[in-house]
Image: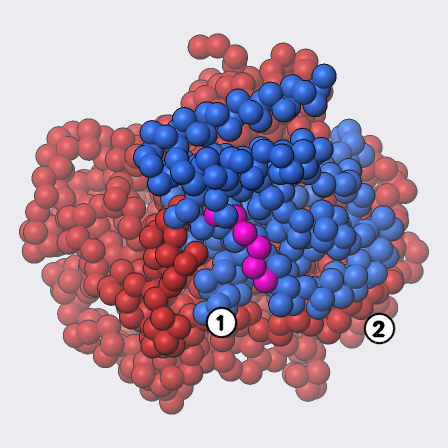
Amino acid sequence: MAVQPGPNGRVKLNITRRSFLKAGATAGTLAALGRPTGSLAQKRPGAEIPWYRTGTIETTYNNCDMCPWRCGVLVHTVDGVVRKIEGNPADPKSRGMLCARGQGGVSFVYDPDRLQSPMIRTGERGDGQFREVTWEEALDYSAAKILAIRDTYGPESLAIFGHTSGDFWFTDYFAQAFGTPNAAKPSSSLCLSPREEAFKLMTGLAVGGHEPVDWDGLQCLTLIGSHIGEDARNTVMQDFSNAWARGARVVVVDPRFSSVAAKADYWLPIKPGTDTALLLAWANVLIDEDLYDAGYVADWVAGFDDYAGHVSELTPEWAEAITEIPAETIRTTARVMAENRPRSAIMPGRHVTWYGTDTQRMRAVYAINALLGAYGRQGGMYFNKSAYLEAYPHPPFAVAGSSGGCSAEPGEESDELPLGPSGKARADGARTSFLRGATAMQELIDPMISGEPYPIKGLVTYGVNLFNSIPNVPRTVEAVKELDFFLAVDVLPMEHIAWADVVFPEATFVERYDELWAVPYKTPFISMREPAIEPLYDTRPGWWMARELGIRVGLDNYFQWETAEEYLDKRLLSVGSSLEKMRAQNGVIVQSGKPYLEDFGEASPFTTTSARIELYSEDLAQAGLDPMPVYEPTEEPPAGFYRLLYGRHPVHTFAKTQNTPLLSDLYPENELWLNQRRADEEGVTSGDRVWLENQDGARSGPIKVKATQRIRPDAVFMVHGFGQQSAGLSRADGKGASDTKLQTRYKLDPISGGAGMRVNFVKLVKEV
Amino acid sequence: MAMAFLLDLGRCIGCQACSAACKTGNELAAGTQFIRLIEQTRGEFPDLSGGFTNHRCYHCADAACVNVCPTGALYKEDGLTRTSRDICSGCGYCVEACPFGVPEMVDGLSSKCDGCADTVRAGGEPWCVVTCPSNALEFGEREEIVKEARERVTAMRARYPKARVYGEDEAGGLGVVMVLPDDPDVLDLPVDPAPGALINTWTGIVQPATLALTAGATVAAGVMGVIARRNHMLELKALEEGEEA
């Protein structure tokens, strides 16, 4: 069934969004309208006169740093003050629209709690006692400490943790030049790793930052634990809304009646931790009822017979007993998915580190998509292509990049881990405690304490909220105490700042140039970031800090440019462009992609040994792991406990935005979603404050109860990122409860190194 | 020319980009919001339905707030309900009269969405419409908006058989024409959002007198204004009690 309200489901009134704040426009056109009169000169709740009439509007190009999605934006300033950030209509992702967090960018910049000056610690770690110093002193001091670590222990002894859009300069560029393979991003092992490793194992390809769902022709979307709307990625909300309005079927698998579950045609309130059983049963139905795409499977899928045999007994009845989803619902949804193939896919999702069995679950997801014939088919899943852009010429790196960044490029994975200059591989246990994948941040904490396999004595964090992202916080605190040197780069005085030896205050995204962003997409594109205003206070851009620090530790040859413009123009020359030319074409360079099978001619897009999608993995079999996904039960909550689930709120990102004035105003503290019946039994009602205690006795701060029908009785849910403890955060300090601090344990995924975090249980404490 | 918003509660996924864009575009102070999203849940686990409603000015054609406003601070223009805070006396009648409970007193003055009168005049769309990632919001000539709403409803009935347009005629026709996935009462919207008999009585009898009184008070002194407001409230309360009796 498909209903057609219009092309792409888009309303016919306005083909493009109409903001009067045009790129590069000045107040000229507005001035012509004259000063506001009558009702316009009113005493507004916010301003006497609309801000855009108070002076000349200047517009610069940027990509938003309020979440990792990085929509292209226009930053409007009036008389040197940023007043409004809007989506850039030319940007393939924002298309002129922007989410609440992006709108909050202005108040992120002008948050009075920002770090203002470089600082060196004067008290004990954790005291938060610092003296303000010059950049010269902060840089010289840090360089001396880093060199001392390098000379005593080797460069591998410096760990670099980076997050958010400027982390390239530290986690990728500086780390590789300096020679440490221990550079990690939370976006890997605390988020995406299982998704990426599963896809590489099966197809040889990367999913890439942007799940390549071919929304335009999609007829059936299946979500497993993806929360479109709460996870407010702008483009995905747009694409989902259009597909939904066009009549695309929506199947949502979630223990919680999420915003998107409320839009679904089928909501499957699955028992947490049992998704793989559902996926195997779906495969059973697709094969048993002959609903799969036999032609596609014959051409593009290897190991089908093995998989068919593997799932032949895994019936919906088998899965019903595990998942608590009725067998008939499992059959019906499988049929709906198949009726719409190949314009039917399960979206890979983003945060998938749940139970430590996550790579196998993701393989079961991709197996369904393969049976539906979705990969490389219109309306299914397209193939991402990276934008072409040459690197700035630099001497060979001391350590290969596959060890550091968010995920290794396909083909960079090898049996041999890249070694640092002292001949040491990563300290995170790759190849021993887990098989493969990008550096696992949480596995670098133990070496700081134990000194095994070798000591990590130095730590640089860039934008990582250290105590509000990595599970087992007590262990992280202990590790930080053991360090010889800890440098923290951040915009705000996050909780871990009090533990740093040196603090570098960073200029926000609207105050700095940054690395160009070559985006893998259906239409690959290059996005730019330029400053709208000078850095506030005594802050500096990340690239400047990395360069100054690099020069001081003997990496001059890697930093041969003087200014960011020089660096960026050199790179842009490789695509016949420049900053000036990019500005003239609305701040974005769009290239053409190769989204579908037919774009590869006779060749295969899949880069596995068989050049097909491999349902059976020889690599895993050789490593002694299950070559096909097997359902492994996860531990059940003890009596009186609930499984702790966590997720997103549409106006917040990770543990980054809780202090941002606008966003704090919209959602100041998180709530505890508790099944209404359970709430009645517990004797609590919405608005009551309770404490949570986990299976290991860890206690949260007080959190407001949200008694709701929207969640299963065996689990509770809270928005991630709250419960931060930092006196310097005037709005976020002590607001709500921290899920991370209740995650004293995690389960390591033996394939990807991901940290499964949904293995913690909490009980309610009504009085303390 | 009558303008209107389209608000599609089928598409709205509750992301609050509208609220944030409104706050930044209009630079509203902390605590002030012209658009609030309310999560709705119906049924018992696991048999649930739900979504989001918007709490925002619906720009009634026959606007109770305009009818009761003693100073003309609330008035109709281009089919939308504008606000002139510089002539608001702070009496708060609009707060009580609105069948949707929308206007709020901010710094002692009536405060609500004015349809981004100024940005529209400058050639743009209201901030919330510009930013909405779900295409749940549109803005245009009311006639076109109503047509679009009907088309969306027709399409939506394949999924939600009870889908309907709301606001085409309600309260004389709203300036926010809504696409509803279900009946209005199910979505906590008044089936007939006409202002209560209280308001009709009041506008017929009391308003002419109070208008003069308030104007006088405003000219005379702030103190007088406060007294006038207190008097208004007493009158209103008396009327209310009369209604109940």
* Residue A263 forms part of the magenta stretch: no
The quarter of the displayed image where residue B4 is located = bottom right
Question: Identity of the amino acid at label 2?
Answer: Gly
Q: Residue furthest bottom?
A: A576
Foreground: A26 or B73? Answer: B73
User: Residue A111: x, y in percent?
Assistant: 29, 46
The magenta region covers B73-78
User: Residue A721: x, y in percent?
Assistant: 44, 38
Task: Give me the residue at 75% from left, 48% from top.
Answer: B170
Residue B123 disc label: 1
Mark 1 vs mark 2: in front: 1
Q: Colour of chain A?
A: red
Residue A295 disc label: 2
Instruction: Please report, as a chain letter, where disc 2 is located.
Output: A
Q: Visible in this render: residue A47?
A: yes
Q: What kind of colouring is applied to the model shown?
A: by chain
Q: In this view, does B129 lie above or below A482?
A: below
Q: Visible in this render: residue A147?
A: no
The quarter of the displayed image where residue A619 is located = bottom right
Q: Quadrant of the N terminus of chain A?
A: bottom right
Q: Is residue A236 above or below residue B217?
A: below
Task: Give me the residue at 50% from left, 66% from top.
Answer: B120
The Cα atoms of the two marked residues, 1 and 2, are separated by 54 Å
Task: Give me the residue at 87% from left, 40% from top.
Answer: A327
Q: Residue furthest top?
A: A767
How packed mark 2 is, by other alpha carbons closer than 10 Å (few <14, some 14-19, many 20 or more), is few
Chain letter for blue, please. Answer: B
User: Residue A494: x, y in percent?
Assistant: 30, 39
Q: Is residue A492 left or right of residue B177?
A: left
